[in-house]
Amino acid sequence: MGEYHTHDEKKPGRRPATPAMVIEVQVRQPWRDCPIYTWDRERDCMRVTDIYHAQPGLPADLASFQVEGQVECPLILLSTSSFAPGTLLQARLLGALCYTSVHNKERPFPADGWVFVAVAEVDASLAAYHSIDMLPAAQVAAMKAYVQTQAWDELQQSAGEIVSYDAETAARSIRETRLLLKREQRMRPKGKGWLRRDEEEERPVAWRAIEGLSEALRAQLLHEKTLQAGPTAPHAQAEHLIRFVHQRFQHALSDLLLDDERLLAFLERPLLHHRTGWLGMQTWRSNEGLFLITDRQVLWLRDFLAPGSSFLPGGYIAHMAPLERLQGIALLAAGRAPGEFAGLLESQDSPYQRLVMEVASQTGSELFAIEFPDKPEIEKALARMTSILRAFLPCPNGTDDRRVRRLPNVEAWMPRGAEAEQLALLGGTVPPDTAERLERRLASLVQALEEELLAEATVPALEDYKSPARLVALTRRALLVLEDACDTSRRSVGGRAGPTEHVHRYDLAKISSAQLRQSLLGSSLSIFVPRPDGHTRQHVFPFHSPAIARFLPLFTRLRLLLGGPYRTG
């Protein structure tokens, strides 16, 4: 007992049609002895500091995972080697073990009393296992025997037979638990009374600067040597200095960045304009912007309208690309672009230096270019930022790419609190019969494709853009756009028009980047799909400005999913 078999010795089984749930788990007790490492900063490498001696009789590594940060669930983690205590890793769910008496008893949450079973996602030798039933009988018996002798919680102290449940049932219990926890959170009283101040304290925002710094510290922080030490050293300068950028950009970043996102570097860019065209009769213009690198994305944020040019709020244009899809970085000097960029950039000649990022997808690559003033200080800042970006590029051909990449953890959007109130005020933008018809078609599509719906937004018909009513929906594998296409020209025998829906599916593996435009003068979501000929097609979906409340959560989930793996060819 205790040895794991490779997939050549597995029981025959069929790969499930629905992708298995992948969760982040933390190892509590390894089943084998393993070394304990720490990071040696002086030598820039790992150092062994101890040996962990495993408790005998364990069937596998014992781990746990959090559901909505409130409920901790036990998990048996299968792998051909043990992981040190406290290690975080991604695990693919195979199923769950549970006492029949517990399963038939009423519980606070569906996941209570269950012991989940998963395999380490990084262990390729176990990739063929998709359910507990496919595991060798000796391994299943060892896990059941261990669960039967352990009091995982009070619910399992009663007698009863231990039965196993498949991966789909186990995943459904986790999702239902998440849903109940989110509903409980929505039902909690709003406001921060004196008796609930500590309980409802807001989570800190990782990328936002510490408040209370004086203006005089800005220059000092640029050269502060103490910021080079400590676990937050890569983020310290940028996250302190971001508070000095204009407030309008900080408001936009509050919408676009996640609370746990870490800011690595940023660069402010002034408004650019120059004469162009025949006899210089035209003016090329690009509004002021902010270029950021976080631990999850590159973000080019610029003004929709120049400040002061209108009495309306300016709005922003946010173009993002996932770090996981960067394939190349180039800094082009002012002037004519090299021959390899011929026909692929918006303009071959430019009076500005350009940062060009190659962003890959399953179908090709997009060239994401940003202009900057041709000044020495900007050039120096760009050199530093390109060195950060190159750390995310694939290794050269002929070498193994051993970088650790974190799979995106994306949950379905459930508005609550102020967000739910804001959405309640949006109603009445799409006729109820049209909205219901689009929702029914979406439900049938999601069910037929065996996908999970993460976010959706209904958009009314917009005369200015000549666009029909739409339902834009995001699943784990695609962006679905359903268009109302009531055909008034073709009528049935009874003289009634036959309402239909046009469905457009955009696989996430084929999308390289995404853009969100927000302004009272016009808002839209854009996706960029590279083609094999080297050009990139931009698909634009306009929406009325109040609907930004629905498109922001869709956009943030879309960009997280784009960071997941994709297959070429």
Image (cartoon, rainbow, N blue to C red):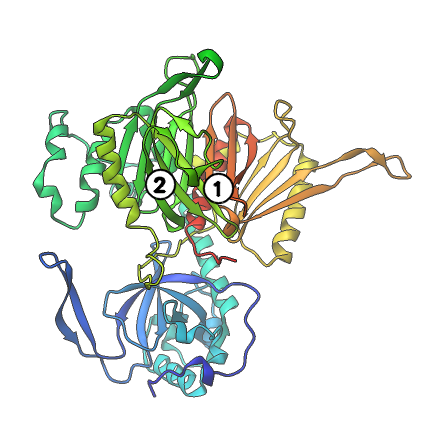
Q: Judging from the image, what secondary structure is the residue with disc 1 in?
A: helix
Q: Position of residue 370 (x, y in %)?
A: 37, 32
Q: Position of residue 333 (x, y in %)?
A: 32, 32
Q: Compare residues 24 and 568 and report the one nearer the observer.
A: 568
Q: Compare residues 16 and 65 and report the one nearer the observer.
A: 16
The answer to which image quadrant residue 27 occupies is bottom left
The answer to which image quadrant residue 86 occupies is bottom left
Q: Residue at (43%, 54%) from the top-left corner?
A: 564
Q: Is residue 416 visible?
A: no
From this viewpoint, which residue is outermost toward the right?
Answer: 493
Q: Dot 2, crowdedness within 10 Å: few (<14), some or many (≥20)?
A: many
9 left or right of 533? Answer: left
Q: Residue at (45%, 29%) from the top-left corner?
A: 347
User: Between disc 2 and disc 1, whose residue precedes?
Assistant: 2
Residue matched to label 1: 554
Q: Dot 1, crowdedness within 10 Å: few (<14), some or many (≥20)?
A: many
Q: Amino acid at mark 1?
A: Leu
Q: Is residue 369 visible?
A: yes
Image position of 215 with respect to 42: above or below: above
Q: Position of residue 210 (x, y in %)?
A: 19, 35
Image position of 463 with respect to 93: above or below: above
Q: Position of residue 89 (x, y in %)?
A: 32, 63
Q: Residue at (51%, 36%) from the top-left corner?
A: 526
Q: Compare residues 430 and 498 and report the one nearer the observer.
A: 498
Q: Nearer the viewer, mark 2 or mark 1?
A: 2
Q: Judging from the image, what secondary structure is the residue with disc 2 in?
A: strand
Q: Amino acid at mark 2?
A: Val
503 left or right of 359? Answer: right
Residue matched to label 2: 298
Image position of 420 with respect to 147: above or below: above
Q: Residue at (15%, 29%) from the top-left corner?
A: 218
